Amino acid sequence: MRDAAYGGPGAMAPPEGLLASAKFSEVFVWVKNLRKMRAFYHETLGLPIAYENERFVELRTGGVPIALHSGRKAVGRSKPHWFLEFVVRDLDATIRMLRARGVTCERVREEPFGRISSFVDPEGNVIGLEESSR
């Protein structure tokens, strides 16, 4: 059943920009093997740890933090269904550093907005890299 405030006949429309002023706080990634994923994101990718406990690791980025959580299963899908993307200044240098740490990156593609590549974490989640042309 749809929310009566925004759903049925004669219902009011959602306010414009309903969440536009809300702070996007972090991205949760539900993981099977926290130790392995912590090592990949912290040691391989170099993301600093802001906080951790036995079921949770919060990693700092240049923007929204990434929270690795092993306390419950991902809801609704068996395959990864999200995409993280990091904007980098030098895509080629970033790829060289990742490859030196054993990460396999996809070939670089030219797009109207810049150059992109991607790689996967140990549990198959896709992580994108973008060097913006803007």
Image: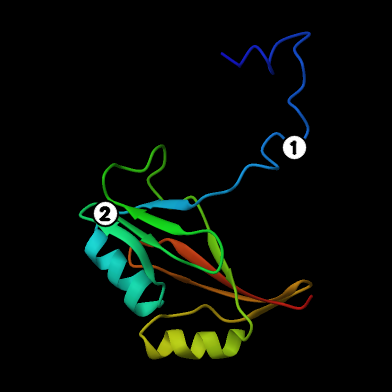
Residue drawn at 48 percent across, 52 percent down? 27
> Residue at the location (60% across, 16% down)?
2
Q: Is residue 104 left or right of residue 114?
A: left
**Sequence-first tag of 1 and 2:** 1
Between residue 83 and residue 14, name the one nearer to us: 14
* Image-quadrant location for residue 129: bottom right
In the image, residue 99 above or below residue 69: below
- Identify the element where label 2 is drawn: loop
If the image is split into quadrants, where does the N terminus sit? Answer: top right
Q: Is residue 44 above or below residue 29?
A: below
- CB under 8 Å between callouts 1 and 2? no
In x, y percent, where is residue 116? 63, 75
Check the picture and name the quadrant holding the C terminus.
bottom right
The residue identified by callout 1 is 17
Residue beneath disc 2: 32
Q: Quadrant of residue 22?
A: top right
